[in-house]
Image: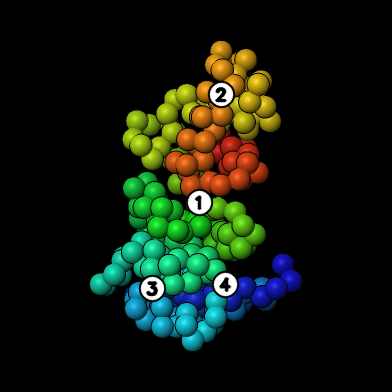
Amino acid sequence: MTKTIKILLVDDHPLVRDGLRARLEAMPQFEVVAEAGGAAEALEQAARHPADLVLMDINMRGTNGIEATAQFKQAFPQIAVLILSMHDKLEYVSQAIQAGARGYVLKDAPGKDIVVAIETVMSGGIYYSAALARQLAQPQNQDNQLTSREHEVLRHIAHGESNKQIARALDLSVRTVETHRLNIKRKLGIEGQAELIRFAVQNAQ
């Protein structure tokens, strides 16, 4: 990437922010333009220091990171929000994506993940840490997770099959396959077909 990505760090632990700043600023494509320890301060900093992306923690005193994400998307819709959290519960992931976050990275993920996540989000994609992506792809009964049938469809998508081919393989109508595709994208917070295919290739078993 040729353009420098301007980043706002939001975490209520100064030591965490220091570590993130040091890691990100060691790379020429990133510039940390401001830091904040909470939602209100973050909104003030964003108004003073134009940013491309907010790296947002969830657990913060006062307004949590999910609520702060929703506030950011309303006040600064042009700024992408990437969640960086220790919580690996899918309900948090689902709430964050619904609030407008473009990705979710676990704090215990490999260091390179944050770099890949930022670049993916800034390229228009959605990023999940590998552990979360695997959970999201597993067949579950909860509303924000994939059903067994959706998991099957995802596996066929990973093999590059068209809706007609998938319909024939699973003995379904093409319209039903299209509905499954839409449901998968909705549950995973994925918008485009290219992003769905990328997710399928990386995570379908």
Q: What is the number of the mark on residue 128?
A: 1
Measured as percent of width and height from the top left, residue 101 is found at 46, 59
Measured as percent of width and height from the top left, residue 11 is found at 38, 73
Q: Are marks 2 and 3 in contact (CB under 8 Å)?
A: no
Work out whether residue 108 can be spotted.
no
Q: Earlier in the sequence, mark 4 or mark 2?
A: 4
The residue lying furthest to the left in this view is 62
The residue carrying mark 4 is 52
Q: What is the number of the mark on residue 11?
A: 3
Work out whether residue 140 can be spotted.
yes
Instruction: Identify the residue at image location x=34%, y=78%.
Output: 40
Q: How was this image coloured? A: rainbow
Q: Earlier in the sequence, mark 4 or mark 1?
A: 4
Q: Nearer the viewer, residue 112 or 161?
A: 161
What amino acid is found at the position of numbered circle 1 in the picture? Tyr
Q: Nearer the viewer, residue 149 or 204?
A: 149
